[in-house]
Image (cartoon, rainbow, N blue to C red):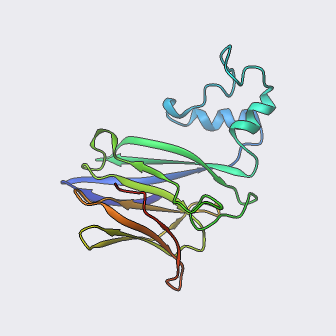
Amino acid sequence: MLVAQGQAGGTTWQARAQLWPHPETMGQALAQQEKWPAKQRNTELASPSPGHPMADRSPAERLRLIYPPGTDTVRVFLTVAGTETESSASRVPSPDGRPPGPTGGGAGRSLEGSLLGVKGGGAGGVPVLVAPVGPDVARVVAAWSDGTSTEAVPVVLGDSPMRWIGLPGKPGVQATSVRLLGAGGAVLATDTQWFH
């Protein structure tokens, strides 16, 4: 699912997200991971190496610890000029999991997400924040140190209760805040840790 797209320095970039529902069996988990890039596969799931903390656990225990009940996996990635350059995966509440808070982290106050495009220049040198937000968030606004602002509208990803935003940074400018706003404009949460 396309979360955000843009151009920076003459280069087209896209931030995308893929929803992977909670696997109920080891076979489902392994089948999902086969479709992921090798660097994101959990090699300790099927056959932990000797001495690894998972080595003494049963396959059912490993599955429960790596894929906690009530969670789905979302893989986010950045493409630059049509080539995947960077990716990350995280657990989010599944439809039958805990209700999400506005910041995607349940009870947390800071916005949880992935800052893609930092390694290797990314989106023409512009980092892109890709993050989950709760269903009550209507828009996300970054206020920049130069007095401007950028807005992102959350997108729905499958049957996930979370919504996803892609918010590009601005070259040479820091964010003073990233605010999550409800439908009526009420501030649901404020984060001051991104884009520094």
**Residue farthest to the top?**
50
Q: Nearer the viewer, residue 136 or 29?
A: 136
Vertical position of residue 24 compared to residue 150: above or below: above
Q: Position of residue 35 (x, y in %)?
A: 56, 36
**Residue farthest to the left?**
10
Question: Residue 64's quadrant in the figure?
Answer: top right
Q: Is residue 98 left or right of residue 165?
A: right
Q: Residue at x 53, y 55 (%)?
A: 112
Q: Residue at x 49, y 43 (%)?
A: 88
Q: Is residue 50 left or right of residue 132?
A: right
Vertical position of residue 67 compared to residue 12: above or below: above
Q: Position of residue 166 (x, y in %)?
A: 42, 60
User: The C terminus appears in which quarter of the rendering?
Assistant: bottom left
Q: Nearer the viewer, residue 1 or 113?
A: 113
Q: Nearer the viewer, residue 1 or 122?
A: 122
Q: Is residue 93 left or right of residue 8?
A: right
Q: Nearer the viewer, residue 11 or 110?
A: 110
Q: Residue at x 39, y 61 (%)?
A: 167
Q: Position of residue 138 (x, y in %)?
A: 51, 76
Vertical position of residue 12 compared to residue 41: above or below: below
**Residue farthest to the bottom?**
184
Q: Position of residue 1 (x, y in %)?
A: 49, 57
Q: Looking at the image, how many numbered discs can be counted on the residues?
A: 0
Q: Is residue 178 left or right of residue 80?
A: right
Vertical position of residue 50 compared to residue 59: above or below: above
